Amino acid sequence: MEQYNSPDEKPWVPILKPRKSGVVAYGKFAVEEYNRSSNASLEFKSVLQGAQRKIGGRKYTWLDINTSNGKYRADMYGWGGSKGHKVLISFNKLNY
């Protein structure tokens, strides 16, 4: 049985439609933020898969993203809906 750290922590829920506009917007945000912070020039291609969960008032998301330089895993959180505030936590190259 899965345990949670707090009553507000929910399990990860798979993203069933990675091509949905809101999911794509999160993927594009992750690539743009990575490019800005690391002086890179990756081009977003698509979201391959991902999952989300809510903890408190924040929505945590991980996405596997296809870019012009291969596949990456982006971890981020946000609040305030799709037009609210988003923060990229990590962005790492995948080896599959």
Image: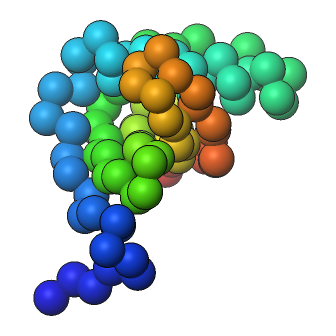
Vertical relation: 68 (above or below) 64: above
The x and y percentages for residue 86 are 58, 31
Task: Locate the N terminus and report the quarter of the image it occupies.
Answer: bottom left
Q: Residue at x 29, y 11 (%)?
A: 21
Residue 67 makes an appearance in the image:
no
Q: Nearer the viewer, residue 5 or 19?
A: 5
Is 95 displayed left or right of 55 in the figure? Answer: right
Q: Residue at x 20, y 47 (%)?
A: 14
Q: How is the structure coloured here?
A: rainbow
Q: Residue at x 64, y 47 (%)?
A: 89
Residue extending farthest right: 39
The x and y percentages for residue 25 are 43, 15
Examine the image and state in which quarter residue 8 appears: bottom left
Is 33 displayed left or right of 49 in the figure? Answer: right
Vertical relation: 94 (above or below) 31: below
The x and y percentages for residue 64 are 40, 38
Vertical relation: 9 (above or below) 94: below
The x and y percentages for residue 53 are 32, 52
Q: Residue at x 63, y 36 (%)?
A: 87
Residue 52 makes an appearance in the image:
yes
Q: Nearer the viewer, residue 31 or 80?
A: 80
Tell how many labels: 0
Examine the image and state in which quarter residue 39 appears: top right
Examine the image and state in which quarter residue 17 appears: top left
